[in-house]
């Protein structure tokens, strides 16, 4: 990546952390944030490496700063993979493939957090919680994660158009 792209990536991570830290909605297992905005913008404009870096770093640092260290490495992997997938499919010229990439990246985030949340509930529930109960309880955050992706996608679309001329 070029110096300008690295700088823009660092700015996206910083803005993403500030936006996500200021505007977050608590849930039983964590919180809903605006982290998707920077992931979509980075992946759309600069491809899979930027999507991976912005997603992974933002997710990791946000959980660290917000006091959810148990989520840091899950967020690094889940949001990083989400950004990589979105960026990987976005380099295609066909609109249908790009839409598929956005949906697949979004699904990866929702599914990844459902698995991670179920795992954390199971290991912290001790002998009292079965794996089945943890998996079912993990479903509680799926609607919030779907909303997080949708809001992030819509806001990224709105912000992305005027940003296009500045970040190229």
Image (cartoon, helix red, strand yellow):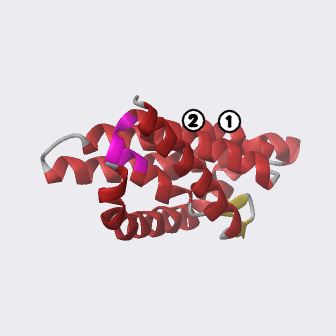
Q: Which residue is mark 2?
A: 77
Count the labels in the image.
Answer: 2
Residue 121 visible within the image = no
Q: Is residue 87 left or right of residue 33?
A: left
* Residue 129 percent coordinates (x, y): 80, 48
Residue closer to the observer: 68 or 51: 51
Quarter of the image where the N terminus is located = top left
Question: Is 134 in the magenta?
Answer: no
The answer to whether residue 134 is seen in the rendering is yes
Residue at x-position 40% and y-position 30% = 2
- Residue that sits furthest to the left in the current view: 94
Q: Is residue 146 left or right of residue 96?
A: right
The structure residue drawn at horizontal position 60% and vertical position 40%, both measured from the top left corner, is 57
Label 2 residue SS:
helix
Tell me what residue is drawn at x 62 percent, y 64 percent. 19
> Callout 1 environment at 10 Å: few (<14), some (14 to 19), or many (20+)?
some
45 in the magenta segment:
yes
**Residue carrying label 1:** 73
Q: Is residue 22 above or below residue 60?
A: below
Picture coordinates of residue 11, whole percent (x, y): 55, 49
Q: Residue 50's quadrant in the figure?
A: top left
Q: Nearer the viewer, residue 19 or 114?
A: 19
Mark pair 2, 1: CA separation: 6 Å
Which residue is at 27% across, 41% downward?
Answer: 89
Q: Seen from this angle, which residue lies furthest right?
A: 127
Q: Which residues are magenta?
A: 42-48
The local crowd at label 2, few if under 14, some if 14 to 19, many if 20 or more residues have their Cα within 10 Å, is: some
Q: Secondary structure at mark 1?
A: helix
- Check residue 91 in the rendering and tell me which mark sits there, or answer none: none
The answer to whether residue 26 is above or below residue 126 is below
Residue 122 in the figure: left or right of residue 40: right
Circles 2 and 1, Cβ within 8 Å, touching? The answer is yes
């Amino acid at each position: 990546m070029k110096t300008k792209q690295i700088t823009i990536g660092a700015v996206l991570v910083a803005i993403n952390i500030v936006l996500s830290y200021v505007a977050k909605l608590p849930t039983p297992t964590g919180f809903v944030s605006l982290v998707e905005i920077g992931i979509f913008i980075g992946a759309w404009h600069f491809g899979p490496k930027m999507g991976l870096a912005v997603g992974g770093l933002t997710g990791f640092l946000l959980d660290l700063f917000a006091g959810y260290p148990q989520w840091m490495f899950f967020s690094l992997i889940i949001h990083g993979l989400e950004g990589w997938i979105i960026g990987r499919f976005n380099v295609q010229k066909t609109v249908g493939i790009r839409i598929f990439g956005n949906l697949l990246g979004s699904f990866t985030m929702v599914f990844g957090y459902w698995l991670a949340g179920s795992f954390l509930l199971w290991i912290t529930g001790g002998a009292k919680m079965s794996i089945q109960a943890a998996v079912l309880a993990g479903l509680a955050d799926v609607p919030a994660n779907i909303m997080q992706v949708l809001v992030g996608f819509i806001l990224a679309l709105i912000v992305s158009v005027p940003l296009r001329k500045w970040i190229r």
